Image (spheres, rainbow, N blue to C red):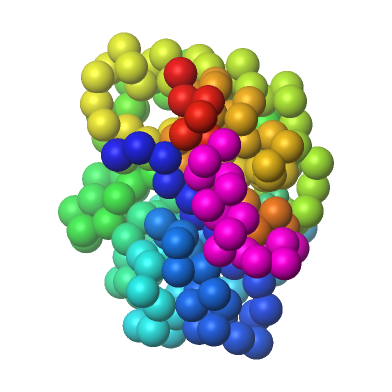
Amino acid sequence: MGIQISPSMLSSDFANLEAEAARIAGADWLHMDVMDNHFVPNLTLGAPVIEALAKVAAQPIDAHLMIADPDRWAPQFVEAGAGSVTFHVEAAAAPVRLAREIRAQGARASMALKPGTAIEPYEDLLPELDMILIMTVEPGFGGQKFLDICLPKIERARDLIDKHGGDIWLQVDGGVSADTIERCAAAGADVFVAGSAVFGADDPDAMISTLRGLAEGHTP
Ligand code: DX5
Ligand code: ZN
């Protein structure tokens, strides 16, 4: 699939989501951060907002559910029109069942890991997944500093994916910028979430091109 950029709308103007999506025409996805004030100490948006944006945006929606009980709530996000739905393995009671349900509904199923969660215990789940999300900050807020300690896990996740041979994307999220994206790409990531780096730039769409070029230049 190659390198993909999924800007986090968390750093965009929530009063103008349609216009903000149009400002980033070069984005492969729109990353929507769903937070419930339980799994993370912040509250953002839910399925109705994603449904509204999905109807008017050109790009598909990449929903990142930082919520408790994703087993119960994730299907709503597929129904709302998300093309990819990511649940946190720390919150899922039955990740295999949940991934199968997301796929059966017609979306890509993705599993996220917080910085302190190891990938190895989930190796056998890989065939059930379309993407793994390695968090490179503690989830909850945009604009945090990239955690270098997560790089070895990106490498190990890439090795596991290659070993299984499936077409599983490897996403990184948190503190990804022109300063850090090369390290992520070199470690094996291929889908890059960037919030403050994209929407904090004078020209967000040009920043997407910059990030894409940096990542493409450092693909292993
Ligand atoms: C953090 C969210 C991220 C966040 C990224 O919990 O999952 O998607 O918006 O923002 P930056 O790129 O600013 O770290
Ligand atoms: Zn996110």
Q: Residue 68, image x and y in percent? A: 57, 54
Q: Residue 78, image x and y in percent? A: 33, 65
Is residue 216 positioned above or below 47 on the image? above
Is the stretch drawn in magenta largely helix, strand or loop? helix
Q: In the picture, which quadrant includes the N terminus?
A: top left
Q: Residue 161, image x and y in percent? A: 36, 21
* Residue at the (65%, 87%) spot, across then down: 15
For the magenta stretch, what is the residue range? Answer: 199-214
* Residue at the (24%, 19%) spot, across then down: 165
* Among the 4 quarters of the image, the one containing residue 122: top left
From the viewer's perspective, tell me whether residue 55 is left or right of residue 116: left
* Among the 4 quarters of the image, the one containing residue 7: bottom right
Q: Is residue 126 magenta?
A: no
Q: Is residue 203 magenta?
A: yes
From the viewer's perspective, tell me whether residue 202 is left or right of residue 190: right
Q: Residue 23, image x and y in percent? A: 54, 75
Is residue 33 positioned above or below 93 on the image? below
Q: Nearer the viewer, residue 137 or 197?
A: 197
